[in-house]
Each structure stands twice: as structure tokens, then as C-alpha cells.
Amino acid sequence: MSDLANALAEVNSRIEKACNKVHRPTSDVQLIVVSKMHPASLVVDLLNLGQHHFGENKDQEASSKALEVKALTKLEPIWHFVGQLQSNKVKSVLNYASYLHSLDRPSLLTELNKQLAKRDNQRLKVFIELNLTDDDQRGGVAIAELNFFAEQVLASEQLELMGVMAVAGLDVPAEQEFEKVAKASEQLQKLDKKARFISAGMSGDYELAIEYGATHIRVGTAITGKR
């Protein structure tokens, strides 16, 4: 097996063990390989290994990479936009992304609705990004404002609210952060039972995130190596 195949297999094995530890089926967890700063050829190699979900965080890179991958293979990746999205990039991102993990403000929601209205029958799956801090300058929606914002998202006919997304802070215990996310998810599900998914966990903490209910984990360097 190649180094890439070994790395992918190792992460999938660790996902299975983390799920077993908390008595969750492995099918509960979707692995998203973050392919930012790697060439389209790496995405093609991973597609050939059976990996279909990929994450990107900058439209300038992702839009061209999506086109290049399409030219290189008949296999179709499922693209997740996982970075902060500028409103002026929404039109471009809608050309390739099936998921947005970083819906973090009303102005972005407005632009998504505006652009989707021009595209008959296109839907976008979205996660509301949480701000786990007390800093209003940080990106994301405060947990106290989650339901109010979620109601606006649910009113959007072409958006499908998946759940919540968060990144654990560097200066606080990850367990504390993931517990906040789990409670926020429970809060959201009281508003909409279908919005039960949690996007949390990266290369350094995805196993712990799974223990706290993560359903979508965003893993880069543990599979792709350093950029």
C-alpha cells in the first residue's frame, strides 16, 4: 500500500475504534479529507482509494481544483466548503460545493438566498458555525443566539440545515469545547429534529470529538501530510 493509502486506512481504523468506544456505528461518522494546499492529483488518488468527501477553505484554490479534478477523473468528489466564506465568493462556491460548514452571519445567509434563488432546484446543505468564546469579534454565532439564527436558516427553501459546526479553541480543554457543541446541538434539535449533525474534530482531536457526538470530522494532515 502507498503511504497515502496507509494514512487513510489508519484514520478510518481510529474512527472505528472511537465509535466502538462509545457504542456508535461507524456509519454515523463522515470523514472529510481537507485537501487545501494540495494538488488535484491527490484528490484523484484519494477518490481511487474510495474517499469521496473533501474539504476546502479558500474559493480561489477550491474552484480551480474542482474543475481540474473533473478533468482528470470520472469519479465525482463531494466538496465541503469549511472556511470562512466571503459574501462575494458565494456565487463561485455554489458552482461546486454541496456543503457549507461555516454559515456564521446574517449577511452571508442573505447572499446565499439571493444566489440560490437564481438557481432552480439547487440546494445547499449548511452547518451553523458556533462561536464558543465570549469574544464578539470572533467568527460564528453565539450559542445564545443559535435558535434565532437557525429559524432564519430554516425559512430558506433552498438551504438544508444539517446542524452545528465548531473548532475547539487552543487555550481551553477540548473536552470542554466539545461538550458545549454537544449541548448546542441538543438545543438546536429541539427546534428542528433533523438538524442533528455535528461538524467538529480535526487531525489532532477527531477521536475525542466523536466521543462527544461529532458526525462530520475534518481531517487534513493526518492523511495528506504537511502542506
Image: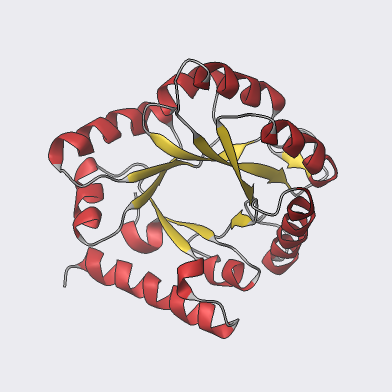
Q: Classify 190 as above or below 109.
A: below
> Residue at horizontal 50%, vertical 42%?
82
- The x, y position of residue 40, in whole percent, is 23, 41
Locate residue 21 relative to residue 4 in the image: left or right. right
> Residue at horizontal 76%, vertical 59%?
186
> Residue at horizontal 64%, vertical 52%?
194
> Residue at horizontal 24%, vertical 31%?
67
User: How many numbered marks, from 0 up?
Assistant: 0
Locate residue 220 relative to residue 170 in the image: left or right. left
Q: Which quadrant holds residue 65?
A: top left
Q: Classify 30 as above or below 60.
A: below
Locate residue 215 relative to residue 155 in the image: left or right. left
Along the line of sight, which residue is nearer the eye, 110 or 208?
A: 110
Along the line of sight, which residue is nearer the eye, 213 or 201?
A: 213
- The x, y position of residue 210, in whole percent, is 57, 69
- The x, y position of residue 8, in whole percent, is 31, 67
Locate residue 136 relative to residue 83 in the image: left or right. right
